[in-house]
Amino acid sequence: MSTEILPTAEGDLGRTPFAHLLVYAADQQLTGALFLHAPDGTMHSVRLEAGRPAKVQMGDGFARLGKLLVDAGIIDQTTHDLPRVVPGLIGDSLVAGGNITRDTLDTWVERQFLLRMTRLFTLPSATRYAYFADMN
């Protein structure tokens, strides 16, 4: 027997713009996951912690960290394509391999976050959202 997890709130960006969702999340100090289903079928997600966006994942690969670092000339494509020194995130592997510093990684992760959050404001009004309280 399967139990379906129902969203705490759902709607579309036409009725509740993304900015309003963020203001409400901040005001209510929400913690959970906000999923955004674009009309083209792409799904993005925002992890909220105490009302603040903490992590953004883009279903279409927008602003991938490795590509941002290559485009900025911080690493070259060959370095990007090397096997990971440590499993997991590319940034941690690049730091462990001595290709970038922790400060550089932190700066670019912040830029990535801002680029992604900014892009979410441009999603079409037909984009559906579903918020799940306390979901990680």
Image (tube, rainbow, N blue to C red):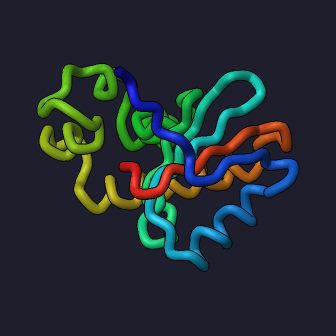
Image position, residue 66 (x, y; %): 40, 34
Q: Is residue 101 above or below residue 127?
A: below
Answer above or below: position of 3 versus 106: above
Rendered image quadrant of residue 43: top right
Q: Residue furthest front?
A: 1
Image spot of residue 42 (x, y percent): 64, 26
Q: Is residue 112 visible?
A: no
Point out residue 115 in the picture as x, y percentages from the top left corner.
60, 51
Q: Say if residue 98 shows up in the picture.
A: yes
For image coordinates 76% across by 42% down, the residue present is 123
Residues 56 and 79: in front is 56
Residue 99: x percent and y percent? 22, 41
Q: Residue at x 53, y 41 (%)?
A: 6
Along the horizontal axis of the image, is 27 left or right of 86? Answer: right
- Residue sitting at x 63%, y 53%: 9
Picture quarter with the N terminus:
top left
User: Eyeballing the image, is 1 above or below 71?
Assistant: above
Locate residue 103 relative to residue 86 in the image: left or right.
Answer: right
Q: Residue at x 85, y 43 (%)?
A: 125
Q: How many marks?
A: 0
